[in-house]
Image (cartoon, grey):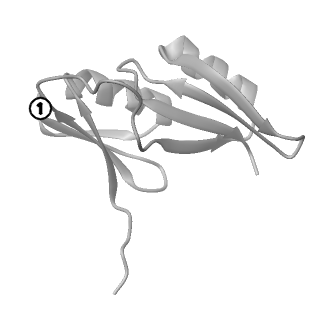
Amino acid sequence: MTLSPEMITFDCTDPDRLAQWWTEATGGTLNAEMPGEFVMVALPSGPRLGFQRVPDPTAGKNRVHVDFSAPDLEAEVTRLIELGATETGRHDIGDAFRWVVLADPDGNAFCVSGGH
């Protein structure tokens, strides 16, 4: 028996708004299963993103985050910031691997690395 990743789910106070933001950020397709309660974003590839309403925002750093890659790291970071993301850090492992840590409008951390 094996597990297959189907969806990465975010707890949030406004799933419609956050799912719309991620739809724009990823080029995914919005699917409002239960508007105001649970909304999904189908990505062009990979697992879906789910957004479920919870009464209180998550405090502190989220313990799990999503990693993305982009052929042009700087252009993608600029685009995401223009959409409303916040850059929170930059890291590298020598010249071989670079990534930028960002937060979505609700403060959920995610990373973008240069294309591989």
Q: Name the residue located 31 percent from the left edge and 25 percent from the top edge.
A: 18
The N terminus lies in which quarter of the figure?
Answer: bottom left
Q: Quadrant of residue 24?
A: top left
Q: Is residue 31 left or right of residue 21?
A: left
Q: Is residue 16 left or right of residue 110?
A: left
What residue would you read off at disc 1?
35
In the rendered view, tell whether residue 45 sits above or below residue 60: below
**Location of residue 91 in the rendering, given as x and y in whole percent from the top left corner:** 73, 32
Q: Secondary structure at mark 1?
A: loop
Q: Name the residue located 37 percent from the left edge and 81 percent from the top edge.
A: 2
Q: Name the residue located 51 percent from the left edge and 34 percent from the top edge.
A: 110
**Location of residue 86 in the rendering, given as x and y in whole percent from the top left corner:** 53, 16
Residue furthest out toward the bottom: 1
Q: Amino acid at mark 1?
A: Pro
Q: Quadrant of residue 22?
A: top left
Number of numbered discs present? 1
Q: Is residue 39 left or right of residue 37?
A: right
**Location of residue 95 in the rendering, given as x and y in whole percent from the top left corner:** 90, 40
